[in-house]
Amino acid sequence: MVDIIIKSKIKAAVPDLNVAEEVADALNSKVIKILEEAANRAKLNGRRTLQARDL
């Protein structure tokens, strides 16, 4: 699996909270799933370019 999420940026996004180690992995998994679904939509529409509307 590709690491898309930058762990230090999670902490910056929620500065008032501690962030457990597994949060980055869980968030990364969700983002990968979203991107896979969006890629499928683009392909079904005959495109080779992922666009915001696919998300």
Image (cartoon, helix red, strand yellow):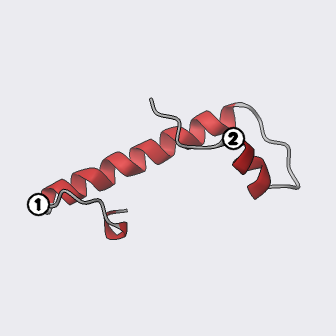
- Within 10 angstroms of label 2, few (less than 14), some, or many (20 or more) residues? some
The image quadrant that residue 8 belongs to is: top right
- Within 10 angstroms of label 1, few (less than 14), some, or many (20 or more) residues? few
Residue at screen point 71% across, 50% down: 9
Question: 6 left or right of 46?
Answer: right
Q: Which residue is mark 1?
A: 46
Amino acid type for the residue under numbered disc 2: Lys
Q: Which residue is mark 2?
A: 7
Nearer the observer, 48 or 33 = 48
- Helix, strand or loop under label 1: loop
Q: Position of residue 6 (x, y in %)?
A: 64, 43
Quarter of the figure that contains the C terminus: bottom left
Q: How far apart are labels 2 and 1 at the CA level?
A: 35 Å
Amino acid type for the residue under numbered disc 1: Gly
Position above or below: 38 against 4: below
Question: 21 left or right of 1?
Answer: right
Q: Residue furthest right?
A: 16
